[in-house]
Amino acid sequence: MKTLVIIPSRLSATRLPGKPLLKVNGLSIISHVFKKAEEANIGEVIVAAEDQEIVDDVKKNGGQAIITNNYHQTGTDRIYEAFLKLDNPKIDLIMNLQGDEPLMNVDDIKKLNNLMIKNNSDLGTLASTISHKAIYENKSVVKVKTKEILTNENFPEAINFSRYILDQDKKIYHHLGIYCYQKETLKDFVSYEQSFDEKKNKLEQLRALENNIKINVALAKTSPIGVDTEEDFLAIKKIMEYKSK
């Protein structure tokens, strides 16, 4: 099966405007994510951007990027437009890697791709174990509840996603910003209207569950921080600068 990795990106994030072009070690966040996806070597990688500045930055740093419309409600709607523009009938799987996840583990990206192929799943994602009690109560950390306890081998279904799960159930994990779709599943997903729960929680994966699209979850090795706030950016900057020494 042939996989295409698309990274959605835009400058107008509400909590941290301009974050894709914030620099760490002289390279923008979005270009760090592009290089991480390329390193996974699972297929062609392209950034789908709302802004020309992002396209220019990615290309300047040796990556591929295309401009997309600015009316999309979610990153998944944006990657579908990019997929249609690329017009490659040989693609089977589309991986949506969030543009604010520069610390995503390369082995975890590979694992998700492999499990999607092995299980012929419609839609898959990653989650990691929750090590600190505060994470359960942190609304900026998305939690996922699965049908079974995650192991290194299994790929169980998600029951629910929430920012507000407070009970410390053994089947609740930290959801990571990555999805992998069969191309027909992606087409179905974007055809559905945004649901009330999706808008209320700002979680597009709820649209899939509410329309009976099964989401399988793989256990990730690491629990990377996404860049959502100024504090997140400073924390990630510190980690990445330390690693580069």
Image (tube, rainbow, N blue to C red):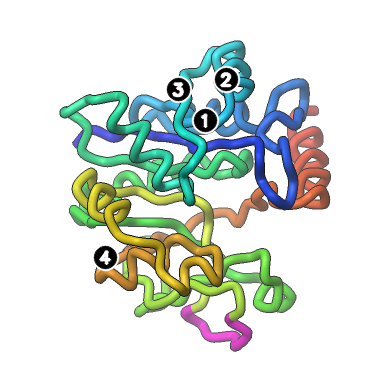
Circles 1 and 3: CB atoms closer than 8 Å? yes
Circles 4 and 1: CB atoms closer than 8 Å? no
Which callout, 3 or 4, points to the residue nearer the camera?
A: 3
**Residue, disc 2:** 58
Mark 2 → mark 4, Cα distance in angstroms: 33 Å
**Residue kind at label 3, given as amino acid type:** Ile
Residue 178 falls left or right of residue 20: left
Q: Give the quarter of the figure containing the C terminus.
A: top right
Disc 4 residue crowd, few under 14, some 14–19, many 20+, Cα 10 Å = some
Q: Give the quarter of the figure containing the N terminus.
A: top left
Q: Which contiguous range is marked in magenta?
A: 165-171
**Residue kind at label 1, given as amino acid type:** Ala
Camera sees residue 154: no
Q: Closer to the N terminus: mark 3 or mark 2?
A: 2
Foreground of the two, 225 or 212: 212
**Mark 3: which secondary structure?**
strand
**Residue, disc 1:** 49
Camera sees residue 47: yes
* Depicted 84 relative to depicted 188: above or below: above
Mark 3 → mark 4, Cα distance in angstroms: 28 Å
**Residue, disc 4:** 213
Rendered residue at 35%/35% (across/down)? 81
The percent position of residue 226, horizontal first and vertical second, equals 65, 50
**Residue kind at label 2, given as amino acid type:** Val
**Residue, disc 3:** 66
